Amino acid sequence: MKLGTTLFLVSYALAVIPACGSDLPNSQTPGASAGSAGNTSSAGSSGNVGSSGSAGAPSNAGSTSSAGSTDSAGSAGTPSSAGSAGSAGAPSSAGMGGTAGSAGASGGSGGLSPLQECTKTASIDRITQWTATSGECTCTPVGNILTKEGQTEVAKVVFNGGGWHVVPVLITNQFGKTADLSAAPGITLTYSATAALHVQIRSGTHWDGGDQWAADVPSTSGMKQTFTIPFDASKWMSLFGTPVQTLSSVLKEVQGLVFVGDSANTVVFYGLRIQGFEPACP
């Protein structure tokens, strides 16, 4: 093959093949004011729901910090642009937090009435779609993370470090389908984690990108615990880009939750409940 033809083909390939994690934050640094915080993630299909990033220091369980955004899209920061995860910026913990408690009854229901699990496929609180994404996520395993722990179904994933790690959870069990959670008080999560991570709430209208609302999920030092994150605007922020939707508008069309972290971690999910919402089994 002639040299000119070879150079043409190499240039074409570089131009048309997107870089892995192209939706990760670039050189943005969280601002000092509340409302400028945020994670980033990319997802586009139910089979491979994107890649993501997150940064932030762990918050203690039970934090009730009042610093945070009002129920608006915020005033600081700009939407994150394509870039590498290595330049995600310094951690920020302003305004995030939740309420800690003991491990909930019935597989981590947090005191809520137990749900009948799905019969045709594995589920946790009737949610069947627990996925660790590929790409920059150095996770073990990649793909479906549901597994048996004794007689109990759990979702277990190891973040091996060295990049952003992303676990999308489709609460409706179907990509493209949303749920109105505007009347719900918050999320009750039963889990264990050896390091802190974050959870983003994603709408059907704006699933992709780093300009999302996020809350802290603190480390439990590997111990099982139940943690409630209220749908209070002071508990949700964006670490990198100003959200394009208000939190109240996102809650009207929630497609899923995206758990993200940028440090080595072993995370086990035992339960995820949203009061007043019961996922439909596939």
Image (tube, grey):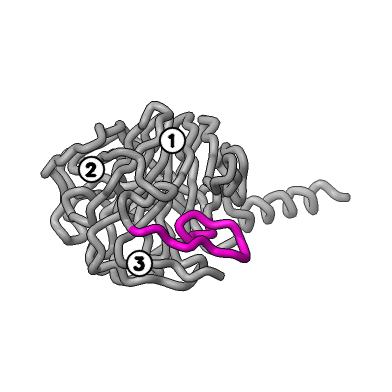
Q: Position of residue 247 (x, y in %)?
A: 24, 61
- Residue 217 seen in this snapshot: yes
Q: Which badge, 1 or 3, comes first in the chain's sequence? A: 1
Q: Which residue is label 1 attached to?
A: 262
Q: Which residue is label 2 attached to?
A: 99
Spatial separation of the CA atoms under disc 1 and disc 3: 30 Å
Q: Position of residue 55 (x, y in %)?
A: 35, 37
| Image depth: mark 2 or mark 1 in front | 2
Q: Nearer the viewer, residue 91 or 85?
A: 91
| Secondary structure found at label 1 | loop
Q: Is residue 85 above or below residue 271?
A: above
Residue range in magenta is: 113-129
| Secondary structure found at label 3 | loop
Spatial separation of the CA atoms under disc 3 and disc 2: 20 Å
Spot the residue most to the right: 1
Q: Which residue is label 3 attached to?
A: 277
Describe residue 247's horizontal placement relative to residue 257 as left or right.
left
For the point 27% across and 40% down, the residue is 101
